[in-house]
């Protein structure tokens, strides 16, 4: 609905704008767009030009850096050779030029030079000159040619300047054709006397061949200069330029020879073109590698891109001009179609719509508004005044109230958004919204919100009331209690009664959830009948209810109420044709006697209820401080229990299972014992329920299983071990895997392990339970049904799954041998088990008379204090050893 209103408003505004000056806006917008396209194209072309220059500069920098690293390594090797030769010469301790000439001009020295100079493909090899500049030895030939370098500049500088140790110069070659780049080093005597020099030379072509491999492209060059400006080699090669000095010109040109690394843009002194220049000074020698590329070559790709972008821009502008022309031509046609669409949209809206201008005159009114109130289209039409529209509604019966006051109120607030819900004479709820318009008027919408509001009311009710019983839920009760707690300061006491339906789970499991739900509804009705109008009855969830009794702290009155509730609930309930007996446990907490904090009161009512359940159910208890103490003890027991396994406080005792016919031990039941460091031996009846409630029984049960299997593997003969499996372990769905792991780890034969399960594991989901039992039987272990006859299960389980053994609960054994004892029940179980080929074990046998009766009844096994209590593993081994010896 909101979308339709917004669309309609925007369309109406659009029509008004186009009816103003469409041509002006169209031309102005098109011109702005064309200028923007031209500027954008220019900026893009300029950005691409800068990118191309930066890319070319980066390429030159990388090439120069690569070449410099290469020649740094090569010339370092070059210098190492010369230095090694000089070190060899100076090691002779020659003190005069004549001795140097005579001792260094020998064949033996020629062999030394040739060995040191091998592996370098230069032109003149390593050459040795005396103090007069005459060649006296060479690595390349013997005997040496008659050559002198006395006229060379580098020779005279080394000879005349003791501080000069190395010179590099390009000179006309005397060992071959063309120029040569000479690297010469001074040889000095013990006192600095000039004895001669060692030189090596390479041709410019050798450097240029390596330069060419860099492949910088067209209109680019790579050169090597001496730092003094002399050109040593260049690609492309120009023979006349080799040896010339280029250290002149502008500051930028001079910087090429002065700085370690330079990247700049210069006019070339060779061809006059603008070039990008990158230069790097080598580290070991005074040489500079210089790479250049013309700006035109660098921007070659950019020129192509520029043509493409300019072409695209021109075509785009032309297309824009054509598009604007077509839009302008179609505008009148579209205006008519859009007006028709506007009328259609307005008249198909589910809301009533009116739009008024700043003069209170109606601009738009859709058909839905007229139909909603049964108005006349001849009165409510564009041009009508707001007051006339409301007066017409009053005259036709769809508006009740004072027309003048209503109109004055709306008009005085026309600049603000207003919303109200009104009810029509026929009971409909209509939401009226007034929103200010952009030009000073306002927009009014009338929407059929009856169902939405009724749904909101239902949702609010569902959030605070229980869906099954329609009683207040926990959320509503808590809000009610917060108000009651706030009234305690005014001397208004109250009480909380927590009510838990006894044995409700058994009803659900045995009779089904439909019967259980009907039982809860009947309980809710009976609880309502037990209280007055000021009291609150709530369902907290599941089978738990609560009553907040207002205006009393009298225990006698509350006791009477609890008795009334118990009597009301004890009457059998007819649920779906079933007569279901029921009862409850009730806990009572009184404010302010038992506290003035809401959470404390709720907790104490809950503790009192659990005290009633633990003390026999079907009764009530008023909170006393000792319940808090018991709760703290249980919490401490839980904390200690969580650490008992890691601290090694558990141990397994074993109670023998005695064959009644042979009177020998054929098996033992593993029973868990907890030796607490402070409390001593803790009864399993105290800690096993806590372990099951907290889920710790899974980890503890797995430990008992492993311990029992490991211990039983050391017993003589085929004596089996029985281990109890709790319902929590059974529901984990990994029981079979854990049993298999325990058997594999201990080496115990599967047939010697017997798992005892109670009937409760079959109640929740018997199909899943039978699947798990079948998995255990497939492992080869035996299954015993423990505590038979004390649960809720059916005898049909004995037919649906072939248990290996039935254990008869001690409650049926304790009175055997006495008048009207349980012998007939035991006899029936034995016969039933025998028919199914199952063994039977009687628990809790304490007298010879009981054993004798059980033997006569045909029971297979017994266990109890008559033969032996549960004993530690060491004592059990003594018993088994004595039995083996007697046998």
Image: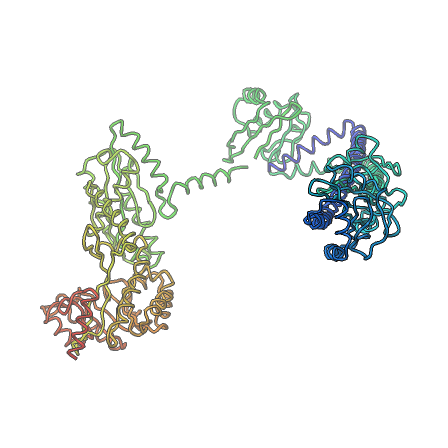
The image quadrant of residue 320 is: top right
As displayed, is residue 640 above or below residue 429?
below
Left or right: 271 in relation to 374: right
Residue 782, image x, y percentages: 30, 72
Q: Quadrant of the N terminus?
A: top right
Of 736 and 857, nearer the camera is 736
The image quadrant of residue 748 is: bottom left
Q: Residue furthest right?
A: 240
The image quadrant of residue 747 is: bottom left
Of 46 and 772, nearer the camera is 46
- Asked whether residue 332 appears in the rendered view, the answer is no
Left or right: 126 in relation to 426: right
Identify the coloring: rainbow
Q: Residue furthest bottom?
A: 887
Residue 146, image x, y percentages: 86, 51
- Asked whether residue 259 appears in the rendered view, the answer is yes
Residue 218, image x, y percentages: 85, 46
The residue at the point 21 percent across, 43 percent down is 629
Q: Quadrant of the C terminus?
A: bottom left
Q: How many marks?
A: 0
Residue 265, image x, y percentages: 80, 35
Of 63 and 81, nearer the camera is 81
Of 184 and 876, nearer the camera is 184
As displayed, is residue 751 above or below residue 410?
below
């Amino acid at each position: 609905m909101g979308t339709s209103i917004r669309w309609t408003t925007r369309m109406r505004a659009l029509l008004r704008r186009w009816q103003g000056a469409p041509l002006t806006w169209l031309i102005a917008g098109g011109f702005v767009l064309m200028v923007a396209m031209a500027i954008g194209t220019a900026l893009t072309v300029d950005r691409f030009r800068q990118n191309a220059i930066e890319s070319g500069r980066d390429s030159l920098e990388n090439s120069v850096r690569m070449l410099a690293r290469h020649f740094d390594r090569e010339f370092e090797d070059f210098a190492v050779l010369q230095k090694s030769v000089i070190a060899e010469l100076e090691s002779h301790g020659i003190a005069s030029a004549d001795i140097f000439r005579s001792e260094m001009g020998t064949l033996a020295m020629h062999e030394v030079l040739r060995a040191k100079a091998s592996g370098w493909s230069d032109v003149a090899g390593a050459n040795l000159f005396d103090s007069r500049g005459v060649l006296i030895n060479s690595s390349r030939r013997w005997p040496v040619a008659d050559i002198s370098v006395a006229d060379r500049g580098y020779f005279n500088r080394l000879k005349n300047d003791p501080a000069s140790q190395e010179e590099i110069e390009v000179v006309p070659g005397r060992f071959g054709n063309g120029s040569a780049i000479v690297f010469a080093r001074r040889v000095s005597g013990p006192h600095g006397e000039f004895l001669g020099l060692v030189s090596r030379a390479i041709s410019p072509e050798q450097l240029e061949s390596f330069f060419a491999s860099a492949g910088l492209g067209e209109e680019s060059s790579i050169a090597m200069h001496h730092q003094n400006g002399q050109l040593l080699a260049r690609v492309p090669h120009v023979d006349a330029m080799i040896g010339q000095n280029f250290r002149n010109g502008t500051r930028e040109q001079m910087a090429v020879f002065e700085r370690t690394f330079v990247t700049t843009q210069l006019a070339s002194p060779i061809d006059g073109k603008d070039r990008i220049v990158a230069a790097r000074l080598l580290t070991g020698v005074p040489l500079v590698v210089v790479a250049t590329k013309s700006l035109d070559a660098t921007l070659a790709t950019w020129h192509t891109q520029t043509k493409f972008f300019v072409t695209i821009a021109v075509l785009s502008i032309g297309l824009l001009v054509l598009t604007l022309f077509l839009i302008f031509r179609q505008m009148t046609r579209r205006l008519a179609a859009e007006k028709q669409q506007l009328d259609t949209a307005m008249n198909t809206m589910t809301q009533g719509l009116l739009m008024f201008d700043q003069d209170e005159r109606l601009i738009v009114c859709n058909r839905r508004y007229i139909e909603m109130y049964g108005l006349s289209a001849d009165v409510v039409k564009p041009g009508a005044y707001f007051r006339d529209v409301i007066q017409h509604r009053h005259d036709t019966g769809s508006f009740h109230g004072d027309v003048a006051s209503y109109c004055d109120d709306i008009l005085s607030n026309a600049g603000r958004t207003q919303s109200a819900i009104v009810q029509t004479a026929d009971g409909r709820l209509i939401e009226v919204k007034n929103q200010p318009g952009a030009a000073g008027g306002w927009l009014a919408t009338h929407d059929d919100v009856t169902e939405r509001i009724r749904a909101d009311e239902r949702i609010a009710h569902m959030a605070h009331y229980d869906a099954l019983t329609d009683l207040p839920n926990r959320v509503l009760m808590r809000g009610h209690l917060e108000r009651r707690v706030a009234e305690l300061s005014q001397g208004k006491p109250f009480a909380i009664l927590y009510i838990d339906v006894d044995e409700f789970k058994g009803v659900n499991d045995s009779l089904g959830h439909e019967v259980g739900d009907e039982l809860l509804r009947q309980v809710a009705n009976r609880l309502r009948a037990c209280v007055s109008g000021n009291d609150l009855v709530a369902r907290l969830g599941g089978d738990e209810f609560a009553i907040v009794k207002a205006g009393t702290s009298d225990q006698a009155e509350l006791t009477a109420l609890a008795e009334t509730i118990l009597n009301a609930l004890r009457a059998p309930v007819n649920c779906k044709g079933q007569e279901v007996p029921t009862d409850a446990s009730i806990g009572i907490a009184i404010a302010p006697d038992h506290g003035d904090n809401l959470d404390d009161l709720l907790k104490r009512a809950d503790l009192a209820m659990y005290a009633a359940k633990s003390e026999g159910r079907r009764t009530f208890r008023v909170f006393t401080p000792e319940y808090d103490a018991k709760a703290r003890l249980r919490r401490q027991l839980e904390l200690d229990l969580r650490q008992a396994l890691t601290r090694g406080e558990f141990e397994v005792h074993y109670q023998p299972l005695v064959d009644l016919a042979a009177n020998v031990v054929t098996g033992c039941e593993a029973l868990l014992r907890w030796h607490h460091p402070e409390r001593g031996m803790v009864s399993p009846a105290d800690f096993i329920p806590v372990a099951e409630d907290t889920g710790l029984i899974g980890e503890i049960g797995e430990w008992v299983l492993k311990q029992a299997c490991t211990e039983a593997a050391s017993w003589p003969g085929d004596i089996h071990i029985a281990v109890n499996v709790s319902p929590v372990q059974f529901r984990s769905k990994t029981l079979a895997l854990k049993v298999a792991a325990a058997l594999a780890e201990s080496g115990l034969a599967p047939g010697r392990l017997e798992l005892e399960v109670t009937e409760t594991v079959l109640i929740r989901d018997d199909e899943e339970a039978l699947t798990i039992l079948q998995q255990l039987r497939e492992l080869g272990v035996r299954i015993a049904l423990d505590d038979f006859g004390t649960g809720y299960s059916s005898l049909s389980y004995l037919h649906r799954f072939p248990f290996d053994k039935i254990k008869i609960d001690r409650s049926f054994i304790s009175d055997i041998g006495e008048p009207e004892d349980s012998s007939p029940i035991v006899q029936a179980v034995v016969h039933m088990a025998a028919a199914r080929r199952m063994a039977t074990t009687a628990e809790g046998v304490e007298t010879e008379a009981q054993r004798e009766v059980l033997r006569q009844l045909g029971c297979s096994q017994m266990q109890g204090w008559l033969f032996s209590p549960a004993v530690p593993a060491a004592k059990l081994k003594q018993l088994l050893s004595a039995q083996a010896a007697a046998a």
